[in-house]
Every structure is written in C-alpha cells, then in structure tokens.
C-alpha cells in the first residue's frame, strides 16, 4: 500500500541532509503530482542548505589560516555613525571551525540580516561561542575623546572580557591601539570572516536593545525605530525639542548651529 503524502513528508523531514536524495529517488516513480511537488520542495531545500554550508565555510578562510588550537577573536562595532546612544563593540571566540558548521549557519554581516534573524543568531552565538565580550562606551565619553577613540575603547573593553585571552585578533578594517596581540585588519571583514560576523551581530543586537530601552525613557525621539541614526524624522525632533541626555553633542553642530550644541 502506497504511503500517504503526509507519511512521505515525515520521512523526508526526518532524513539527514545526506539522505534526502536517496529518499527522493525512492519515490521518484510515484506518479502523484502532490508527491512530485513535495520531492521538488525538499530537493530545493537541500540545495539551498548546501549553498549556505558553502557560504559559511568560505567565511572561515582567515580563521583556518592559523594552526589548530590558536585562540582567534573576531571584533566589530555598531553605532559609530548615529547622533545618539553609545558605540558598542563585540568580540567573539568561536570554537574549532574545521568540523561541522551546522551551528553557525546564516551568521553573516549583521547589516545583511533581519532584526529577527539577528536576535536568533545572537542567542546561538552566546550558546556556542568559546567566549564573547561586549564593550559599551557612552555618548558623553564619545564627546570627550571623539568617536574613533571611543570605538577603540569599546573594542578593548570587549577583548578584556574574553577567557581565554585571544592570540589573534581579526578586526573589521581597523588596528586597535593598546593591544598586544597580532591584529589582522580586514576590509569588509564582517562579510568575509565568520568570527567578525559573529562579533557584528553581538554588537548590533546589544546596541539595538539599549536604544529600545532609551525609547521608553525618551519616547518623543523615536529611538526604537531609527536607533539614534540621523533619519529625517529624528533630525526634525531634535530641532523641535533639542537634544536629550543620550545625544552626542559633538555630532549635532550642523543641526543645532555653531555654538548652540553647548546650550
């Protein structure tokens, strides 16, 4: 007696990735259109998954350049450009990437991911990373030392939280002063290194959560939607109400007019 469509789907759902094609081949002669549509669906799903494995594997080339056991850390930041809120850096040490990468599928430059996907991967990284750290530098500190130095400070804080201490730092397009480890600056590193991409997700999700909390404190500014970036609505609100305590006063000169930012 032929299996029902639901039974075949359950069989495909339970099959390991490597076994999907053999299951599909077994039902290839089934003439039911619904079955053939189901087989096409799972073959397509397998193809997409294999492509994702290939993409993620391609993002391990910098990490795999070093001998096995080398403690490698990816570093990235979020919030360098906004008019308000802190700058946040993430630092992540992933486990040995020479084996199965199933736990790290879909990790990518945080800007390429939806908010929901970033939040899901944030939890995955926390669960599977050897160690991670987050550095947060306030708007007041940004105004005091400038955004570049604040960026470096946030990165040093994040690295200081890691156990074990990293031996190699893979950075997104910077060399961080004040750290003794070997550093590799990678242009667009969050799209090229799995460790940096993981760090970018840690930084972005942490900062977004901070801005959502600030939205409750200062609801008229709309921080939950624009996260402090200089959107048209945000600029109009600043002009209407003036800056609030989390605005970077040094970033508002052109908006408030020379000298007004100190009022």
Image: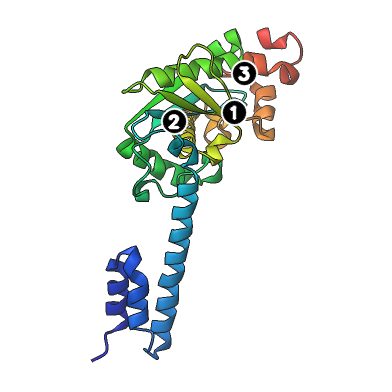
User: The residue tagged with tag 3: helix, strand or loop?
Assistant: loop
Please give the label number shown on residue 227: none
Please give the label number shown on residue 206: 2
- The answer to which quarter of the image holds residue 230 is top right
Q: Residues within 10 Å of mark 1 (few under 14, many from 20)?
A: some
Please provide percent x and percent y for residue 218: 52, 25
Q: Nearer the viewer, residue 106 or 24?
A: 24
- The answer to which quarter of the image holds residue 19 is bottom left
| Image quarter in which the N terminus is found | bottom left
| Image quarter in which the C terminus is found | top right
The mark nearer the N terminus, 1 or 3, is 1
Q: Residue furthest left?
A: 1
Q: Which residue is mark 3?
A: 243
User: The residue tagged with tag 1: helix, strand or loop?
Assistant: loop
In front: label 1 or label 3: 1
Q: Residues within 10 Å of mark 2 (few under 14, many from 20)?
A: many
Q: Residue furthest front?
A: 67
Q: Which residue is mark 1?
A: 173
Mark 1–mark 2 Cα distance, whole angstroms, equals: 21 Å
In front: label 3 or label 2: 2
Please provide percent x and percent y for residue 106: 45, 49
Q: Nearer the viewer, residue 82 or 224?
A: 82
């Amino acid at each position: 007696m032929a299996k029902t469509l639901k039974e075949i789907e359950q069989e495909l759902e339970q099959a390991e990735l490597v076994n999907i094609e053999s299951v599909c081949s077994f039902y290839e002669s089934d003439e039911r259109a619904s079955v053939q549509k189901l087989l096409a669906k799972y073959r397509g799903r397998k193809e997409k998954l294999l492509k994702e494995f290939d993409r993620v594997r391609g993002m391990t080339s910098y990490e795999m350049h070093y001998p096995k056991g080398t403690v490698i850390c990816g570093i990235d930041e979020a919030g360098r450009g906004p008019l308000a809120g802190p700058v946040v850096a993430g630092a992540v040490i992933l486990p040995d990437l020479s084996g199965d990468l199933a736990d790290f599928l879909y990790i990518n430059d945080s800007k390429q991911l939806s908010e929901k996907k970033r939040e899901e991967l944030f939890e995955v990284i926390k669960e599977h990373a050897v160690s991670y750290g987050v550095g947060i530098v306030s708007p007041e500190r940004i105004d005091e030392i400038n955004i570049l130095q604040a960026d470096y400070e946030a990165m040093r804080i994040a690295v200081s939280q890691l156990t074990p201490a990293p031996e190699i730092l893979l950075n997104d397009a910077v060399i961080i002063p004040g750290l003794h480890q070997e550093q590799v600056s990678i242009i667009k590193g969050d799209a090229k290194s799995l460790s940096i991409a993981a760090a970018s997700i840690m930084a972005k999700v942490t900062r977004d959560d901070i801005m959502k909390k600030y939205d409750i404190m200062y609801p008229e500014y709309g921080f939950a939607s624009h996260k402090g970036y200089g959107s048209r609505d945000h600029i109009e609100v600043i002009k209407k109400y003036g800056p609030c305590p989390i605005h970077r006063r040094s970033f508002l000169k052109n908006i408030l007019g020379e000298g007004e930012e100190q009022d």
